[in-house]
Image (cartoon, rainbow, N blue to C red):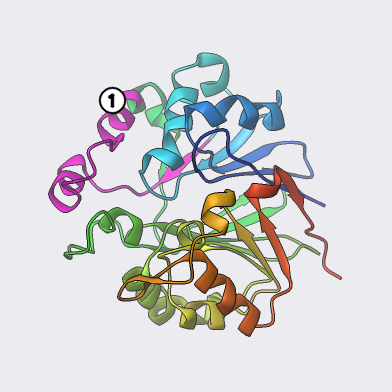
């Protein structure tokens, strides 16, 4: 049975997951910031990294990866790098106030590992040592709209991970209301999953309708204490605080929750 670890924060907030396959190899999703990389690599150990999947290019998701590929002892162990990112020009145009985008640094570091890069287009499925990773959605440069600092989130890569006798897991990255509606429209039949990674750390993410379609039994919250306790408010139209999202899950009858505020955790994957 594969293992899945959800990493706790060694930075203000982040998202990082590690699968350990039945073949004792690793698959990483995002991984957080530079401060989170040592803990990530403790979990990975000396295992081959069969795939490193990046949902979108915000600092709390990819700067650990950037630091990793700058270290040959890590970079040499990575087999595939899966992403589908917008251009730096898009980010500068659509997120003018988001001045700490690491995309320039990302693209500058990429030539050293370019032969390992895979464009994670919707419809692509990877078979990795017993895991099946299906990429369902990527908005990339689709969402040019006035809400600040959300264009890149809305373009997040969404994937679903399955394996024999394992609970299915849907990773939403930092997807927001617009991307969530398109995901529901384009991939609705593929969304039902046993476990869901809560979009955008559990706040200002996809709408209730998306979670209703997913119908999860368990939720993964990349949320430190301060975010877990975020007030039940509508920050902007369709953008809610974490307590509001938690109420949605209560209404859906979800009773199994894992939050990074409680430390790094192994997520139970065996089908009952």
What is the span of residues highlighted in magenta in the rendered image?
80-109
Residue at image point 61% right, 76% down: 249
- Asked whether residue 214 appears in the rendered view, the answer is no
| Depicted 249 relative to depicted 135: above or below | below
Q: Among all residues in the image, which is located at the extreme top?
A: 72
Describe residue 153's horizontal placement relative to residue 255 as left or right.
left
Residue 265: give x, y in percent of width and height.
74, 47
- Quarter the C terminus occupies: bottom right
Which of 39 and 9 lies nearest the eye of the viewer? 9
Residue at image point 79% right, 57% down: 268
The residue where tag 1 is placed is 108
Residue 62: give x, y in percent of width and height.
43, 37
Residue at image point 67% right, 38% down: 26
| Depicted 246 relative to depicted 69: above or below | below
Which of 240 and 67 lies nearest the eye of the viewer? 240
Q: Among all residues in the image, which is located at the extreme right?
A: 272
Residue 168: give x, y in percent of width and height.
68, 66
Label 1 Cα crowd, 10 Å radius (few <14 / some 14-19 / many 20+): few
Describe residue 243's horizontal placement relative to residue 150 as left or right.
right
Q: Is residue 105 magenta?
A: yes
How many marks the image carries: the answer is: 1
Describe residue 184's horizontal placement relative to residue 223 as left or right.
left
Which of 51 and 177 lies nearest the eye of the viewer? 177
Question: Is label 1 in a helix, a strand or a loop?
Answer: helix
- Asked whether residue 46 appears in the rendered view, the answer is yes
Q: Is residue 146 magenta?
A: no
Splitting the image into 4 quarters, where does residue 107 fall?
Answer: top left
| Depicted 10 relative to depicted 218: above or below | above
């Amino acid at each position: 049975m594969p293992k899945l670890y959800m990493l706790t924060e060694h930075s203000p907030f982040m998202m990082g997951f590690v699968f350990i396959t039945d073949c004792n190899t690793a698959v990483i999703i995002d991984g957080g910031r530079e401060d989170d990389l040592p803990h990530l690599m403790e979990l990975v150990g000396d295992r081959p990294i069969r795939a490193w999947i990046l949902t979108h290019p915000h600092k709390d998701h990819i700067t650990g990866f950037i630091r990793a590929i700058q270290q040959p002892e890590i970079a040499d162990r990575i087999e595939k790098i899966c992403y589908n990112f917008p251009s730096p020009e898009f980010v500068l145009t659509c997120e003018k106030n988001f001045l700490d985008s690491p995309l320039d640094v990302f693209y500058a570091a990429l030539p050293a590992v370019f032969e390992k890069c895979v464009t994670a287009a919707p419809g692509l499925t990877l078979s990795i040592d017993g895991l099946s990773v299906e990429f369902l959605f990527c908005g990339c440069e689709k969402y040019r709209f006035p809400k600040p600092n959300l264009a890149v989130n809305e373009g997040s890569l969404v994937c679903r991970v399955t394996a024999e006798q394992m609970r299915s897991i849907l990773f939403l990255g930092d997807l927001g209301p617009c991307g969530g509606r398109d995901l529901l429209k384009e991939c609705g039949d593929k969304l039902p999953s046993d476990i869901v990674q809560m979009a955008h750390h559990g706040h200002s993410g996809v709408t209730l309708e998306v979670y209703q379609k997913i119908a999860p039994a368990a939720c993964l919250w990349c949320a430190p204490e301060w975010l877990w306790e975020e007030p039940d408010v509508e920050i902007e139209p369709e953008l809610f605080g974490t307590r509001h999202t938690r109420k949605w899950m209560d209404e859906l009858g979800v009773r199994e929750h894992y939050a990074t505020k409680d430390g790094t955790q192994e997520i139970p994957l065996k089908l009952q």
